Amino acid sequence: MNKNVIDISSEKLEKSTEILRALAHPIRLAVVELLSTNKAMSVTEIYTALSIEQAVASHHLRILKDRGVVSLSREGSNSFYSLKNSIFTQILELMYKLTA
Amino acid sequence: MNKNVIDISSEKLEKSTEILRALAHPIRLAVVELLSTNKAMSVTEIYTALSIEQAVASHHLRILKDRGVVSLSREGSNSFYSLKNSIFTQILELMYKLTA
DNA sequence: TTTTTATATAAAAATATTAGAAAAAAGATG
DNA sequence: CATCTTTTTTCTAATATTTTTATATAAAAA
């Protein structure tokens, strides 16, 4: 019960680490920024806005989706991605405050 | 000037990514948690609290120091580490809110 | 249908990160 | 000084991540 002893393999820590790893990439952080100002965006809109290859965007979007950062809804041939929780926007803001 | 076009190699994004990578490890996140409740801790106190090897602790503390997450002050044979900015505590809190 | 557009997946190559061991500093202490 | 403690650095092998290239799938348009 000692507050000063931490179980580094606790669920909470593992899960937090996984999410931070998901965010810890310029492309993926840029996606979070895009989706913070735009409710939803298609893959094309995203890879165009970031000037990256489509396959690269798709790859990173999958990582963000797998880790629960974004959600996906399909409309015809388009996939629309959006932020799953506004906490991600808050994290981005804290990071920007830190690097300002 | 289009808000919807982001330079993924901007200083801001690179720096943020670097910091997030620093945090994205169970041991390092646990260190942030420790230092959120304790103003300063020695390497011994830290590796004891986390039940890890001393060398492993030192290695991770260096990463945290290099990325500006913690700062170091020496007192005799001990090195005392402390959080450099309370924003790191806020990020931890957001993460824990997310994984609750 | 065929073609085009949008998105996803897979394999390979290039890089980066990690744990763990061992050695090397840097101070204290006798 | 010699030695003990505490901390840092360096090395290596194992893993993981990122990028690139190539290919697949699926819907929409022609």
Image: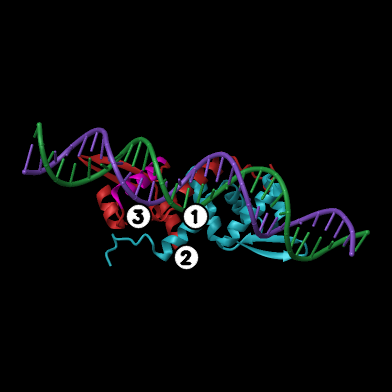
Chain colours: A red, B cyan, C green, D purple
Residue lying at 49% horizontally and 64% vertically, measured from the top left: A98
Dot 3: chain letter: A
Amino acid of disc 1: Leu
Look at discs 3 and 1 and give the one toward the viewer. Answer: 1
- Do the dots labelled 2 and 3 sit on one chain? yes
Amino acid of disc 2: Thr
Residue lying at 61% horizontally and 43% vertically, measured from the top left: A8
Residue beneath disc 2:
A99
Dot 2: chain letter: A
Residue stretch rendered in magenta on the structure: A53-66
- Judging from the image, what secondary structure is the residue with disc 1 in? helix
Dot 1: chain letter: B
Q: Earlier in the sequence, mark 2 or mark 3?
A: 3
Observer able to see residue B35? no
Q: Is residue B33 left or right of residue C5?
A: right
- Judging from the image, what secondary structure is the residue with disc 3 in? helix
Q: Is residue A43 left or right of residue B84?
A: left
Residue beneath disc 1:
B20
Quadrant placement of the N terminus of chain A: top right
Amino acid of disc 3: Ser
Residue beneath disc 3:
A36
